[in-house]
C-alpha cells in the first residue's frame, strides 16, 4: 500500500569505509567532529579541512561492526580517500571506497517511518539515531527523512519494499531535502572555499571546539573565539530561466563588482524556480541585497532555515 511518502535511489554519492584498530583515533585526528562519541546507534555530520581551515568535504558519518562509513559526493569520494590515506602512515587503518558494494536510498514524508520500519524492525526514533539489521543501515536525518544504506545484494528487495509503500522520485529529492534542512554539500567546485562556520557547521552539530587537534583546527577555533562570522549560509529562492550551480558567485551593491558570496548547492523545482544554499555576507541578509551572477542579476529571496542563523 502506497503511503504519503517518497523514495529515491542515491547514485551521486560515494561511500567510504574506514576499518582497523586505529580507525577511530585516525578519524578523530582528521575530522571536525568528535568521532570518539560516535556509537553504532548514532550518526553525525563532520568535515574534512585543509591546514588553512578550508573545507574539502562534508561527510555523513556512522559506525557499524567496528567500521566507520562516510557518505559524500561521488565526484570527490576517491580524491578524499586518497588524501586521507596519505596520512594513515603506520596507523592500523584501511580506507576503502565501498560504493559498488552498497546501494543507498532516501525516504521522506509523513509516513516515512512506517515505510522504513519493515526494513530493520523499527525506524530510528530521533534525528541522527541509527539502526542496523542484516546488511541494512537506517539513519534518521533532519526534515523527517531516512537514509537507507544496504549491501548490494539486499538492494532489489529493498527497492521492491519501498515501491509498495512510497512513491518513487528523482534523486533531486534528496538534494532538495538537504537544502531544506540547511545541510551543505561540498563538491569539487566549492572545495577550499569555506571555513566550517560559514556553512553553518556549528548549527548542524558538525563541529566540536573541545575535541583536540585536526587539520585547520587553529584557524577554525580562532574564527569561533574571536567573534561573529562575517559570512553565513542561508537558504534562498532564485527565479531565473538559467540554472544556478554550486560555485557560482554572488554580488551585492555594497561590494560592487567584487564577489561577496557563493552558491553552495542548488536544485530546480521547475524551469524557472530554483532553491539554493548560499554563503553571503551577514550584512546583506537583512537588506536582501544578494544577487546571482552580477549586481544587476536575479535577487536571492532569503527564506528561513530550520535552525536560527546567528
Image: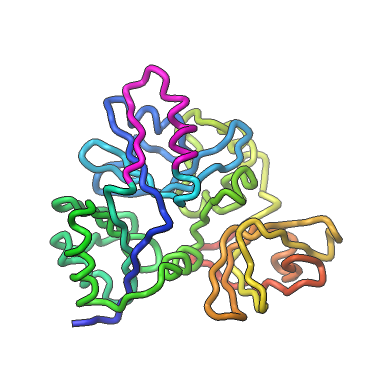
Instruction: Kindly give the residue lying farthest to the right in the view shown.
Output: 256
Instruction: Identify the residue at horizontal 36%, vertical 41% (top origin).
Output: 97
Residue 285 forms part of the magenta stretch? no
Tell me which corner region of the image, top left, top right, bottom left or bottom right, holds residue 293.
bottom right
Compared with residue 48, is residue 290 higher up or lower down, i.e. above or below? below
The residue segment tinted magenta is 78-98
Residue 246 location, x and y as percent? 61, 59
Instruction: Identify the residue at horizontal 78%, vertical 56% (top origin).
Output: 259
Residue 44 as seen in the image, left or right of residue 194? left
Instruction: Identify the residue at horizontal 50%, vertical 28% (top origin).
Output: 213
Residue 166 as seen in the image, left or right of residue 304? left
In this view, the residue in front, 309 or 50, is 50
Image quadrant where one finds the N terminus? bottom left
Q: How many numbered dots are placed on residues in this image?
A: 0
Residue 96 forms part of the magenta stretch? yes
Tell me which corner region of the image, top left, top right, bottom left or bottom right, holds residue 310.
bottom right
In this view, the residue in front, 196 or 72, is 72
Compared with residue 256, is residue 88 higher up or lower down, i.e. above or below? above
Residue 23 location, x and y as percent? 33, 30
Instruction: Identify the residue at horizontal 70%, vertical 51% (top origin).
Output: 230
Instruction: Kindly give the residue lying farthest to the top in the view shown.
Output: 90
In this view, the residue in front, 82 or 134, is 82
Amino acid at each position: 500500500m502506497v503511503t504519503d511518502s517518497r523514495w529515491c535511489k542515491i547514485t551521486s554519492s560515494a561511500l567510504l569505509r574506514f576499518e582497523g584498530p586505529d580507525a577511530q583515533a585516525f578519524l578523530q585526528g582528521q575530522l571536525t567532529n568528535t568521532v570518539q562519541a560516535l556509537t553504532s546507534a548514532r550518526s553525525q555530520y563532520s568535515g574534512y579541512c585543509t591546514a588553512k581551515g578550508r573545507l574539502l568535504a562534508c561527510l555523513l558519518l556512522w559506525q557499524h561492526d567496528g567500521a566507520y562509513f562516510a557518505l559524500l559526493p561521488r565526484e570527490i569520494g576517491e580524491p578524499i580517500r586518497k588524501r586521507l590515506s596519505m596520512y594513515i602512515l603506520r596507523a592500523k587503518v584501511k580506507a576503502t571506497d565501498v560504493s559498488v558494494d552498497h546501494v543507498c536510498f532516501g525516504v521522506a514524508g509523513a509516513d516515512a517511518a512506517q515505510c522504513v520500519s519493515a526494513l530493520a524492525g523499527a525506524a530510528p526514533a530521533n534525528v541522527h539515531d541509527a539502526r542496523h539489521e542484516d546488511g541494512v543501515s537506517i539513519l534518521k536525518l533532519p526534515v523527517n527523512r531516512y537514509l537507507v544504506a544496504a549491501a548490494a545484494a539486499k538492494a532489489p528487495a529493498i527497492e521492491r519494499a519501498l515501491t509498495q509503500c512510497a512513491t518513487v522520485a528523482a534523486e533531486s529529492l534528496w538534494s532538495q531535502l538537504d537544502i531544506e534542512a540547511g545541510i551543505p554539500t561540498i563538491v569539487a567546485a566549492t572545495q577550499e572555499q569555506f571555513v566550517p562556520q560559514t556553512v553553518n557547521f556549528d548549527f548542524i552539530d558538525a563541529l566540536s571546539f573541545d575535541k583536540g587537534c585536526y587539520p585547520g583546527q587553529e584557524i577554525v577555533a580562532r574564527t569561533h573565539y574571536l567573534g561573529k562570522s562575517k559570512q553565513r549560509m542561508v537558504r534562498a529562492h532564485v527565479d531565473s530561466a538559467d540554472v544556478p550551480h554550486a560555485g557560482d558567485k554572488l554580488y551585492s551593491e555594497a561590494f560592487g563588482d567584487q564577489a561577496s558570496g557563493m552558491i553552495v548547492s542548488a536544485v530546480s523545482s521547475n524551469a524557472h524556480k530554483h532553491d539554493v544554499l548560499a554563503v553571503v555576507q551577514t550584512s546583506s541578509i537583512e537588506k536582501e541585497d544578494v544577487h546571482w551572477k552580477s549586481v544587476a542579476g536575479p535577487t536571492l529571496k532569503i527564506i528561513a532555515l530550520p535552525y536560527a542563523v546567528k
